[in-house]
Each structure stands twice: as C-alpha cells, then as structure tokens.
Amino acid sequence: MQDIIYGLVNSVIDGDTFIIKGTEASESNKNKYSKWERIRIANIDLSELKTPGGYRDKVKLESTIQGIEVSCSVQSRDSFGRVVAEVELL
C-alpha cells in the first residue's frame, strides 16, 4: 500500500511542482513526512520556468490548485528530495 499525505497547497514552484502544508497522514504510512513537503506530480513533465511555456504552465497549475486541499499518493522521493506523488484534489 502506498503512503498517503494530505495537505493544503501553499505555493506553486513550476508547472509540475508545488509545496503543501501537511494536515494529515495515513496511519498506515511506512515513512515520515514533514509539515512542509515539496510535491512533484507523478507522470507529467512540463516546461521549467526559464524555458518557453514554463511560466504559462506554472500559472495554469496555480489557478487549479493554489489554496486547495490535496491527497498525495506517494510513489517515491526524487534526487532533489521532492515527494513524487499522484495528486487528487479534495
């Protein structure tokens, strides 16, 4: 079973990465998570901010999830320490 963390989206970094303020974690989680986690959305790869389309992708994600409670089904941590997760709006 995958770890699941819940939180309020605090800020958006780019088109596929954001920061949540954790509000709850599944009792069956195998790993510990901090109150603030950087989440990388699994299975998408959008433009970085400094490339064409990067700012547009960030604004689109902000308009979709900024200030929204989300559920993150954790897949792994990447080499930058971000939680890689499938994300669902609550």
Image (spheres, rainbow, N blue to C red):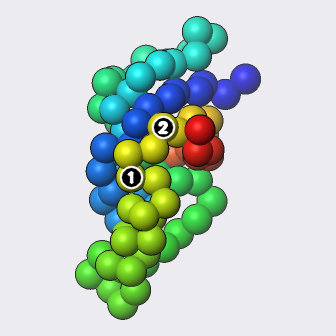
- Percent x, y of residue 40: 46, 51
- Please say if 25 is above or below 68: above
Tag 2: amino acid = Glu
Quadrant (top left/top right/bottom left/bottom right) for the C terminus:
top right
Q: Residues within 10 Å of mark 1 (few under 14, many from 20)?
A: some
- Percent x, y of residue 27: 58, 9
- Percent x, y of residue 15: 42, 67
Residue, x 39% and y 62% (percent of image)? 62
- Percent x, y of residue 65: 46, 53
Q: Residue furthest top?
A: 27
Tag 1: amino acid = Gln
Q: Residue furthest right?
A: 1
Q: Which residue matches tag 2?
A: 69
- Please say if 31 is above or below 88: above
Q: CA distance from mark 2 to mark 1?
A: 9 Å
The kind of secondary structure element at disc 2 is: strand
The kind of secondary structure element at disc 1 is: loop
Quadrant (top left/top right/bottom left/bottom right) for the N terminus:
top right
- Please say if 10 is above or below 41: above
Quarter of the image for residue 21 reads: top left
Residue, x 51% and y 18% (percent of image)? 25
Residue 66's disc number? 1
